[in-house]
Image (tube, grey):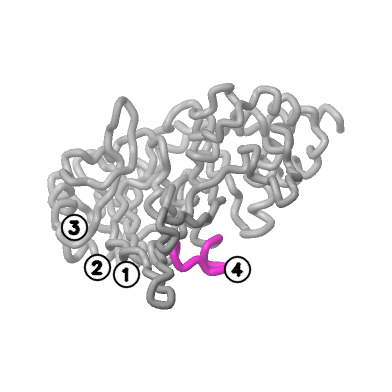
Amino acid sequence: MSLTILPKPAFQDFVSRMQADYRVAGPTPKNGAYVFEEIHDPAELRMDYPTTLLPPKKFLLPTREVLFKYTRQNGGVLQDPPETPPTVILGVHTCDLHAIQLLDTVFSSGQYDIHYMNRRKKTLIVSIECLNPCDEHSFCKSMGTLTADEGYDLHLTDLGDRYAVDVGTQAGEQLLAKYANARTAEKEDIQQLNAVISAKWPKFPYRLDFDVSELPSILELSMKSPLWQELGDRCLACAACTNVCPTCFCFDVRDEVELNLVDGQRVRQWDSCQLDEFATVAGGHNFRASRALRQRHRFMRKGKYILDAHKHLGCVGCGRCARACLVDITPVSVFNELYRQQEAGS
């Protein structure tokens, strides 16, 4: 919509003012790493963080949430959970921005998910341009998620002593007008912004040995690859990869009944296709009983199945699963090996 300049000394004031009306979350340091947490003191915020352990997804799709409570008394009564407070998530990297756009598509189409969507409608996203690679595991440039032109309410680019702020939505414009002491961008600001953006691209390597548009066909032709068994032999089935993934959206729903057998609640919590019981059905049959099949399913979803269903790739190149895996199973190595196998066989 428009470009605005927010001096860094005014940024903390911006955060403080929003806290009067919003739950404000953002990246903060914790035990040598970074996590998205609710901000109580703007000084806690680290907008220059490399990456976080868990994605900001957890504010939109909590690891565990009560869908409703119930009682059998008085003819049966349902009680909705407390309303989600209006929220601003600060410092979202563009890879996570693409992931949130996928989640929005998934939960707003087909079976419309009122719990996710009600939370999403009350959430504003203030993203930030990545100017340096997170580490050797990130491959956002290969996945086309190194930049974004939509999905945010405000988008920041660090210009040293100030932020260039791109306004993405009317809600973002109102947020800026009400809480920030910003000014209109001048010619020099725009020139510096263009220079900063141009300078960042050579810093990010292409880590895939092929164009990402080829990934779905590579996976489709790799169903019988021996690589899946190799991965299955190494995999610990710990589900760390799916727990840290910004695009995994599988969940389990269960009823928890109190000891009085009168009151209870229905709970939704994250689930993982890498766990043995995930594909077990009534009668005890497991459609993906081996770790090899579960590994294949995971990578097929990331590079093909989700794309087929929702028009978005299921991997945004954030590298979190590679950092979390104890046996060094990484998307880059898997995708490149499948590509090499096909090149060798062609």
User: Marks 1 and 2, how far apart in space?
Assistant: 6 Å
Kind of residue sitting beneath label 4: Gly
Give the labeled residue for mark 1.
170
Q: Is residue 219 left or right of residue 145?
A: right
User: Where in the figure is residue 189, as x and y percent of width and height?
Assistant: 25, 50
Residue contact between numbered discs 1 and 2, judged by CB atoms under 8 Å:
yes
In the image, residue 139 above or below residue 83: above
Give the labeled residue for mark 3.
18
Q: Which residues are magenta?
A: 106-116
Residue contact between numbered discs 4 and 3, judged by CB atoms under 8 Å:
no
Please tell me which residue lies in front, 170 or 121.
121
Helix, strand, or loop for circle 4? loop
Q: Is residue 76 visible?
A: yes
User: Where in the figure is residue 123, as x and y percent of width and height?
Assistant: 34, 61
Residue contact between numbered discs 2 and 4, judged by CB atoms under 8 Å:
no
Give the labeled residue for mark 2.
174
Quadrant of the drawing holding the N terminus:
bottom left
Give the labeled residue for mark 4.
110
Instruction: Please name the residue shown 76% across and 45% down the image.
Output: 285
Kind of residue sitting beneath label 2: Gln
Magenta highlight on residue 46: no
Q: Nearer the viewer, mark 3 or mark 1?
A: 3
User: Mark 2 Cα within 10 Å, few/some/many (few <14, many 20+)?
Assistant: few
Q: Quadrant of residue 167?
A: bottom left
Question: Which mark is drawn over residue 314?
Answer: none
Q: Nearer the viewer, mark 3 or mark 2?
A: 3
